[in-house]
Image (cartoon, rainbow, N blue to C red):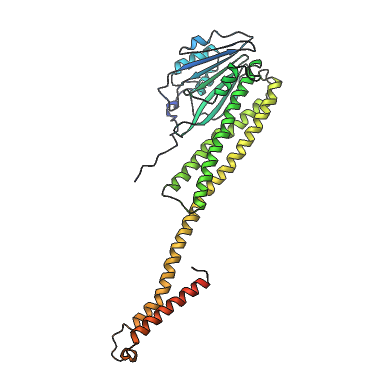
Amino acid sequence: MAKIKRYLPRRPKSTNALHQAPGTVSYVGRKEQVETSLEVIDYNAENFERFSSKTPEDAFKFEAEDRTTWININGLSNTAEIEKVGKHFELHPLIIEDIVNTNQRPKIDDYQDYYYVVAKMLYYKEDGQLENEHISMVLGKDYVLTFQESGGDVFDGVRERLAKAKGRIRSRGADYLVFALLDAIVDNYFAVVEEMSDKIEALEEQLFNSQPNNHTTFEIQELKKTMLRIRRAVFPLREVVGRLEKSKSGLIQAETTDYIRDLQDHMIQVSENIEIYREMTWGLMDMYMTTISNKMNEVMKVLTIMASIFIPLTFLAGIYGMNFEYMPELEYRYSYPILLGSMFLLLLGMLYYFKRKHWL
């Protein structure tokens, strides 16, 4: 039997965080061997600078008030480097703890001088597996920090707009940058949900055509698990975007609030689509069981008709197979062909009757 490939990676264990004091920095995730690296983008309407480094200290020199600095940190397993960044920007110890704990659900915390946002990036990798990556954002007055588990994200469009000064992003502040990053995450939710809808519809068509295979139940179960993962990643983010929209903090400008409101509409739309496809996924198992039941009924129907046809023929053959000496028909020369002809006519008559009743 061919081995079935699993598409859902195991969730990261959180046992490392047990029995530790609040604020203790302990990495909880699957990507233990990822080297910490930084990408820094410093810009304003006229200037743009970008560079990469392995040392957090290289990013600390960008503190000009007339510029916005985006520092993207890849790799969370090296907690010492994460703590350096946190101490430089005076982040609360609980935030640093949450940054390296990839089990955190999407949320937003207001620390007066900055916002801390947790989200989940969903995207399909080249091998077809759905990646669910934990990402943390810190929004300060003129800076944005993003922390990812590893390289690879959905922010290439944002980087391109910054580099080529497309749109209004270079002329806006750090709050608009956070909106742009969240918008890129939500836009990719649509792509992931669309991919899931194609899989659901393909499997639904396969079941509708009564062509399930041996792995159909496994595929349905995997779809159900994937939809639950997507739902857990998307639904809490609605609350995050909603709180950003209603924020009274000076970190969120009034002009940016209009864009965040539009992002909230997108979140509602993608959430509704997820609910629709989730219901369709749960209905696939019922459709599969109905298909299997129909196939079984077809088999039983054929067997029942065959049995019904041969019962009277067996009855006649049983009578004339009895070993009685005095049976008048046995002495007649044409008894045997008459019996065979009667059985044949009876067969045709029963087939005609079944056809009239639409049993065949």
Evaluate whether residue 170 shows in this view: yes
To which quarter of the image does residue 193 belong? top right
For residue 87, above or below residue 271: above
> Of residues 344 and 63, which is closer to you in this image?
344
Q: In this view, does 180 lie to the left or right of 84?
A: right
To which quarter of the image does residue 177 belong? top right
> Of residues 71 and 119, which is closer to you in this image?
71
Residue positioned 49% across, 16% down in the render: 38
For residue 282, above or below residue 319: above
Residue 332 percent across, percent down from the top left: 33, 90
Residue 34 percent across, percent down from the top left: 42, 21
Residue 105 percent across, percent down from the top left: 54, 30
Residue 60 percent across, percent down from the top left: 53, 9
Q: Is residue 173 left or right of residue 145?
A: right
Residue positioned 57% across, 42% down in the render: 277
For residue 196, above or below residue 182: below
For residue 335, above or below residue 151: below
Residue positioned 36% across, 42% down in the render: 3
Evaluate whether residue 231 shows in this view: no
